[in-house]
Amino acid sequence: APPTPARHLDLVSVADSIDAVSSTAPARTIDSSQKSGRDNGIAYRGTATPALQGHYVYIENGLLMAEYSVVHTVAREVLMPLAKNIHRVVEGDDGEVYLQDDNGNVYRLRQTADSMEGGAASLLSQTGCFLPGDPSAPAPGLIPYAPASPLWSDNAVKRRWIAMPDWDTPDTQITVLPDGNFEFPNGTVLIKEFRLGDVIAETRLLVKGLDGNWTGYSYEWNAEQTDATLLSGGKTTVINGQTWEFPSPFVCFACHTAVANVSLGPEIAQLNSDYYYSDTALTANQLTTFDSIGLIAGGLSAPVSELDALPDPTDTMEPLDERARGYLHANCASCHQPSGPGFGPMDLRYFIAGESMGAADENPMAGDLGIPGAKILVRGNPDLSMLLIRMLRLDFARMPILGTEIVDPEGTALVSAWINSGLGFGVADSDADQKTDDLDNCSAVANPLQRDTDGDGFGNFCDPDLDNNGVVNFLDVSAWVPFFNTVTSGDADFNGDGLANFGDFVFFADYFLQPPGPGSVSP
């Protein structure tokens, strides 16, 4: 197995049978009852990995996890993401941690020679990324950026910068990969600051070393807001009244996955948007800016108008489908894509067609939480869509499982509206009302509210059949006349303007002697 980007732990193949490393672990066929879970771990008793002393190690949701006691509570942290076929943890005769995959192959967990403390300043003010006298002020030369569709971080306000040592030759510039991801040169530092209300809580550095490996560092700000201190492990605290989790060096790479090219955020589609540069008081497209100062090797492949661009998820002038897919790309796709650590066949990258996402009507491999009829995604039914249900949970079933303790109200509302609309899966929306024809109760006339006052399955815009006898005739006109020029939100208000008036009367002309429904209306 390849080393983790953090470089502190990796897996080395040692045997093709568990008997070779443990005389006490029973040889067995791995089945669903013996796979990952909190109860199938081990207490670490070895000596080769000092950082794990006193830790309980187990596998959960495709992640190698560790638990340890901290002042009357139990802390949990991610050690590394695992290949999908690794499900078993075993204690070796030497006390070390061994993992077994479904084919019987055995791997030993080991600590690599590199150490975090040896390569990072203990104070943020000493990193060179910020002014020594004011570590909230970025050093000259840092390049600010902001993704169009940002990751949800429990209401934290974030600032982001890129530091590159130089960019005068192709090997010191950004290479744009075929999928739009950025391959940064060695020596790059990606910086993110988190502010909760008026308090700077944390600053994170993601550093690409001279050997090409990435390392994550977390700095906790002091109460005086004068500096931040490097943390050697994960930590949970309360800041401005809300719980905040500082990631350990290991946990960074549970989301910053190798399959997603580690960096996340900086990519063509995320940066193809305008940014206000406060130093110059100018607003410009971020990709155009990067290109103009020579950051991109070979320059952009096309004008920005021809490149992918994710919309702001809160911009209701943008298509619902594109906003929701962009949100899922930013918040979920680093794990949920081919060869990623997420369970199941899902591919939530924005450029994957809905029919190829592996989500619609697919059984959830991680369980349905006891909800009858639940699938990963049920078009038109958010209540049966595990994709959304897990986003709304705050317990063991929550997704994402790390880095958030608060449900994103706007993000979940967006995903719910998208699922309810049915959009993005190759089905037409003929009246452009954000509801696909197969789910629309009046597909010939735009009716985004889907009003169906009498509950007969035909939306009010398609249903002047007030007596529900299956045909629109003088009986319906007679039933409607008493409501003329009245305020109503009932059956007599076909067009939804709150009144029964001539705007509704014309519907009788369209449907006269016709059955209700979209097939009879003249759009």
Image: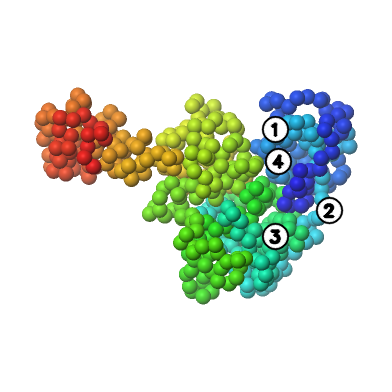
Q: Which residue is mark 3?
A: 207
Q: Which residue is mark 1?
A: 36
Q: Which residue is mark 2?
A: 113
Disc 4 versus disc 1: distance between alpha carbons?
Answer: 11 Å
* SS label for mark 1: loop
> In the rendered view, does 459 fall on the left or right side of 62?
left
**Any part of residue 160 in sight:** yes
Q: Taking 300 as reference, is 497 left or right?
A: left
Residue depicted at x 54% and y 37%: 358
Return the x and y of residue 328 as percentages of the image width and height: 52, 46
Q: Amino acid at mark 4?
A: Leu
N-term-proximal mark, 2 vs 3: 2
Choose between 157 and 492: the one closer to the eye.
Answer: 492
Q: Horizontal and vertical percent for residue 329?
A: 54, 48
**Label of residue 388 in the image:** none
Which amino acid does the dot numbered 3 rest on? Val
